[in-house]
Image: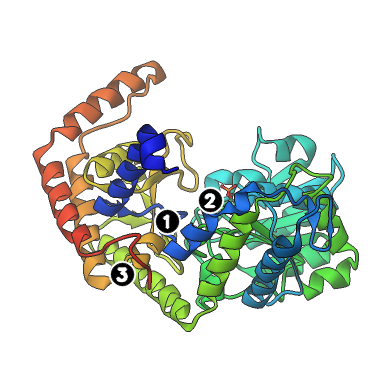
Amino acid sequence: MNLKKTDPKIYKLIEAEKKRRQKGIELIPSENHVSLAVLQALGSVLTDKYSEGYSGRRYYGGQEFIDQIENTAIDRAKKAFNVPYANVQPYSGSPANFAVYIAICEPGDIIMGQNLLDGGHLSHGWKGTISSKLYKSVSYHVKKDGYIDLEEVRKLALKNKPKLLWCGATAYPREFPFKELAEIADEVDAYFAVDIAHIAGLIVAGVHKSPAKYAHIITTTTHKTLRGPRGGMIMITKKGFKKDPDLDKKIDKAVFPFGIQGGPHENQIAAIAVALKEALRPEFKKYGKQIIKNAKVLAEELIKKGIKLVSGGTDNHMIVIDLTSSGSGRGVFLQDALDFAGITANKNTVPNDLSSPFFPSGLRLGTPAITSRGMKQAEMKLIAKWIIQTIEIIKNYQLPQDIKKRKEYLNNFKKEISQNKKIKQIRNEVWEICKKFPVYTDIV
Ligand SMILES: *Cc1c(COP(=O)(O)O)cnc(C)c1O
């Protein structure tokens, strides 16, 4: 049976999405283009298998090969991140983080994480999420200069005595202060968990420092800079075992059977193993270096033209443009206008954003996907030029103060911008460049 014949509707939509990714420039920093090898493992018959439990102790028969696949993924994860333990079963980053709570916290315990509007992740205790309902969540912030406010973290930690301190973010363009945060966690005897979802690939490539020496627990997604399938992992460091020799049993049980998951997705785990093998090759070091080089060039080009960036630049794969100087809530205009120009990015809050996460004042960009396609400094300069032109095109649009009028205003904006000649011109230029950088043929 062949998808094209049996379900032409879905087949065509997948092909259309493939084409969209081929024709456009992907700047969402949490996205990437995986290799054909990863896609092959992900689309394999392993999806048929039930394998609740862990290697050598499963609830179902027929695990001879599944155990070897999962063990391979675990061994490669341990090697890549230099840790003595890895659980590769979490379905994604958020469930991985939830398993950490289940493993080491009781409901009502105090937890600390980076505030969402300051770049932090929902699953680190943002209000309204289950992580803030089950646990007492205290958020720390970034300073005016965009860097984590370590003094505030220490003050809040000494006052609240958290059980768990998170480090990690979804919109933070600087290196994380692992050492300083670890010292604060140690001072109050908290578990220190580092969520490297965004930067995992940079760490394996050796272009961002590793948290292995400082954290007790490391969580990650596998689909961002690491360039694997969507998935999650939880790792324990030597320091983690020193603090709690039973931590492995606690994490395993929290993932299955006492947490929020059932049977592991072994096709996904096989694809993670494949991605980790790719990440352990010397070529991946080059890839990591190029991601950062590209981000720095893109940032410099934007700054040269007077664009304000959160923290004034980047140390990693990510850039957050701050549009507040021209009015708040403008990220949505830039995202939508760039979309019509064939450039995909995402609106994001900036520190001290007066607007809401739905109408934020910033735009988040990243270089992992375009670097996977082989784009380099010359293309970064073009991309910066297109972004600057688009900012100019949208400069007279302002979000209405009256919330009820926003929807209509934005619909109108989209209509106008989709017909804008300059936007169409950019889109044509984008298409031309993208032809030179094929996706999903094979990735170096
Ligand atoms: C992306 C991300 C996650 C969540 O991953 P999902 O796979 O979307 O659940 C968790 N933490 C951080 C810091 C992230 O950037």
Residue identified by numbered label 3: 374
Q: Check disc 1: other Cα within 10 Å, few if <14, some if 14-19, many if 20+.
A: many
Helix or strand or loop: what does disc 3 sit on? loop
Q: Nearer the viewer, mark 3 or mark 1?
A: 3
Residue identified by numbered label 2: 119
Mark 2 and 3 residues: CB-CB less than 8 Å, in contact? no
Q: Amino acid at mark 1?
A: Val
Q: Is mark 2 within 8 Å of ligand 1?
A: no
Work out whether residue 282 can be spotted.
yes
Q: Residue at x 53, y 67 (%)?
A: 275
Mark 2 and 1 residues: CB-CB less than 8 Å, in contact? yes
State which tag comes first along the sequence, 3 or 1. 1
Residue 72 at x, y percent in the picture: 67, 70
Q: Residue at x 20, y 64 (%)?
A: 436
Q: Check disc 2: other Cα within 10 Å, few if <14, some if 14-19, many if 20+.
A: many
State which tag comes first along the sequence, 2 or 3. 2
Q: Amino acid at mark 3?
A: Gly
Mark 3 and 1 residues: CB-CB less than 8 Å, in contact? no
Q: Is mark 3 within 8 Å of ligand 1?
A: no
Q: Amino acid at mark 2?
A: Gly
Residue 299 at x, y percent in the picture: 33, 64
For the N terminus, give its image quadrant. Answer: top left
Residue 396 at x, y percent in the picture: 20, 35
Side (left or right) of 152 relative to 64 = left
Q: Check disc 3: other Cα within 10 Å, few if <14, some if 14-19, many if 20+.
A: some
Helix or strand or loop: what does disc 2 sit on? loop
The image's mark for residue 310 is 1
Work out which residue is located at the far front of the displayed protein and give it.
Answer: 1
